[in-house]
Amino acid sequence: MTLAISSAHADLLVALRRTDEAPRVVVIGATALGHHVALRPTADVDLAIAADPGRISELLQRQGWKADRRLPQRWWFGDALVDVLPATQAAIDAGHVMLGDGHKLSTVGFDIALAHAAPVPIPGTDISVDVASLASIVLLKMVAFLDRPHERLKDAGRR
């Protein structure tokens, strides 16, 4: 079974995997959840990348992705979007990472997501990418909800 992602997302994941000194990439969020259970399609792909924000920016810009003007973790390629969350060991140990806009993002549960991810084929390729386990996705969704309950009703299953 492969991931249900757009060709732009597949191209990005392949490029990240083929990069010299490729950082660890784990698919998290709704795309990962959709891999485990049938869900509505999602327009974005959420990635935890074990690299500092500067290195992530360099990798994405090299592939033609453009940084969002409002959200420092969001990147665009045409109408395809990806939210990239730095998952360095230092950020995991600290329990959070500071984004470019001064927003503090929790990294609670990222260690579980990285430790319990499994390789899944990228559509149309012979390359795989790690996808977070169902249990770790549930943990990350709970953390996101508890971090910002009024903004994150979708993480509690409400729209």
Image (cartoon, rainbow, N blue to C red):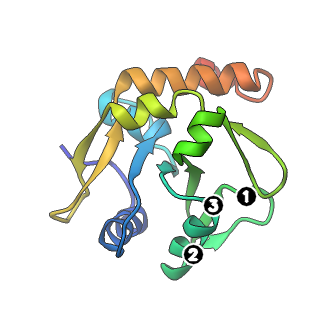
Seen at 34% across and 41% down, the residue is 131
Residue type at numbered disc 1: Pro
Q: Where is residue 85 in the image (x, y as percent from the top left)?
A: 58, 49
Q: Which image quarter: residue 119?
A: top left
Seen at 51% across and 21% down, the residue is 139
Looking at the image, is mark 3 or mark 2 earlier in the sequence?
3
Disc on res. 33: none
Q: Mark 1 points at which residue?
A: 72
**Mark 1, residues whose alpha carbon is within 10 Å: few (<14), some, or many (≥20)?**
some
Seen at 43% across and 25% down, the residue is 136
Looking at the image, is mark 1 or mark 2 earlier in the sequence?
2
Left or right? Give the position of 1 relative to 78: left
Q: Name the residue under label 2.
A: 58
Q: Mark 3 points at which residue?
A: 53
Residue type at numbered disc 2: Glu
Q: Where is residue 86 in the image (x, y as percent from the top left)?
A: 58, 51
Q: Circle 3 — which element?
A: helix
Q: Position of residue 110 (x, y in %)?
A: 50, 34
Is residue 72 depicted above or below 15 in this figure? above
Task: Name the mark nearer the viewer: 1 or 2.
Answer: 2
Quadrant containing the C terminus is top right
Residue type at numbered disc 3: Pro
Q: From where the camera sits, is residue 79 visible?
A: no
Quadrant containing the N terminus is top left
